[in-house]
């Protein structure tokens, strides 16, 4: 791979005038491989990247995932594996190797697992392979506040919400981006300011979960992650184009 993940993503974004990431959250009853390939072919020119989670990661073989990734690359898109990696380094390093073999450009990791013997070697190995690591910072569902919003008392006796610690550590540990739900524009704004806009913010939760694309973008979101609102639309191309135009013009 040439350049870093962030550089490649920015190139894809500029090429397509898009800050839209398609989440390939497909129904298990579909022909998953063919459906994924069709969506990439149909919508690729409206996107900057595709995100692939357990809807495809579990049922598809590695060789089939490679076909999906290659199809995205042929359209000039970046690919993100959404497995919320959250394990010790020996396991994480195996996952990084397999994702790299499948051609993925980046993956999402959970910073709760810590740095030593966990994310430090994981991030280092990912970067050696030209891959990016995106930190899960605040999810988009209603119950996210029960975890990411927890107030943590530090050794200094000061108190911070967990998501602020995750954002600070993303900078300190060398992450390549942050996940903050579009349903929390105030937190997007807070995290963007906290990181001095140095890391791209990826925001899921637009549409079906109640998040507003425009509110998220105005708050500081760099890339919208949208799945069901496009996939379930009567006119997928028109919906993707509408979101692409918003994502580009609002920034």
Image (cartoon, rainbow, N blue to C red):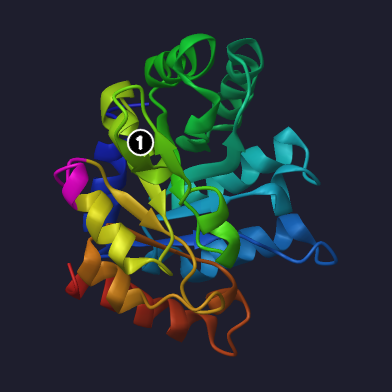
* Image vertical order of residue 208 relative to residue 53, above or below: below
What secondary structure is marked by label 1? helix
Residue with the most extreme bottom position: 234
Residue 15 visible, this orientation: no
Q: What residue is shown with label 1? A: 165
Q: Position of residue 24 (x, y in %)?
A: 60, 60
Task: Locate residue 90 relative to residue 159 in the image: left or right.
Answer: right
Residue 195 part of the magenta-drawn span: yes
Mark 1 residue crowding within 10 angstroms, few (<14) / some (14–19) / many (20+): some
Residue 52 visible, this orientation: yes
* Image vertical order of residue 28 relative to residue 94, above or below: below
Residue at the (48%, 20%) spot, across then down: 119
Residue at the (21%, 71%) spot, across then down: 218
Residue at the (36%, 82%) spot, across then down: 242
Task: Locate residue 149 relative to residue 208 in the image: left or right.
Answer: left
Q: Quadrant of the N terminus?
A: top left
Q: Position of residue 246 (x, y in %)?
A: 27, 77
Q: Which of the two residues, 249 or 83, is positioned nearer the viewer here?
A: 83
Residue with the most extreme left position: 196
Task: Locate residue 7 relative to residue 59 in the image: left or right.
Answer: left
Q: Which residues are magenta?
A: 193-198
Q: Which of the two residues, 135 or 150, is positioned nearer the viewer here?
A: 150
Residue 231 part of the magenta-drawn span: no
**What secondary structure is the stretch in magenta mostly built from?**
loop
Q: Which of the two residues, 83 or 81, is positioned nearer the viewer here?
A: 83
Q: Position of residue 216 (x, y in %)?
A: 31, 69
* Image vertical order of residue 85 relative to residue 81, above or below: above
Residue with the most extreme right position: 29
């Amino acid at each position: 791979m040439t350049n870093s993940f962030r550089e490649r993503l920015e190139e894809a974004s500029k090429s397509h005038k898009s800050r839209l990431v398609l989440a390939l959250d497909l129904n298990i009853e579909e022909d998953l491989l063919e459906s994924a390939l069709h969506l990439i072919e149909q919508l690729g020119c409206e996107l900057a990247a595709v995100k692939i989670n357990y809807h495809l990661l579990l049922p598809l073989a590695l060789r089939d995932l490679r076909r999906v990734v290659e199809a995205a690359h042929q359209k000039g898109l970046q690919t993100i594996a959404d497995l919320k990696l959250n394990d010790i380094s020996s396991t994480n390093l195996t996952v990084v190797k397999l994702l790299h073999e499948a051609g993925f450009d980046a993956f999402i990791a959970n910073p709760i697992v810590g740095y030593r013997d966990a994310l430090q070697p994981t991030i280092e190995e990912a970067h050696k392979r030209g891959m990016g690591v995106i930190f899960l910072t605040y999810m988009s569902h209603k119950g996210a506040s029960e975890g990411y919003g927890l107030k943590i008392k530090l050794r200094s006796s000061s108190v911070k919400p967990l998501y602020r610690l995750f954002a600070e550590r993303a900078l300190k540990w060398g992450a390549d981006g942050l996940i903050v739900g579009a349903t929390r524009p105030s937190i997007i704004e807070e995290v963007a300011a906290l990181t001095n806009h140095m890391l791209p913010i990826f925001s899921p939760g637009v549409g079906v979960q109640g998040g507003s694309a425009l509110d998220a973008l105005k708050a500081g979101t760099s890339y919208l992650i949208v799945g069901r609102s496009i996939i379930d639309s009567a006119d997928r191309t028109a919906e993707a184009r509408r979101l692409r135009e918003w994502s580009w013009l609002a920034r």
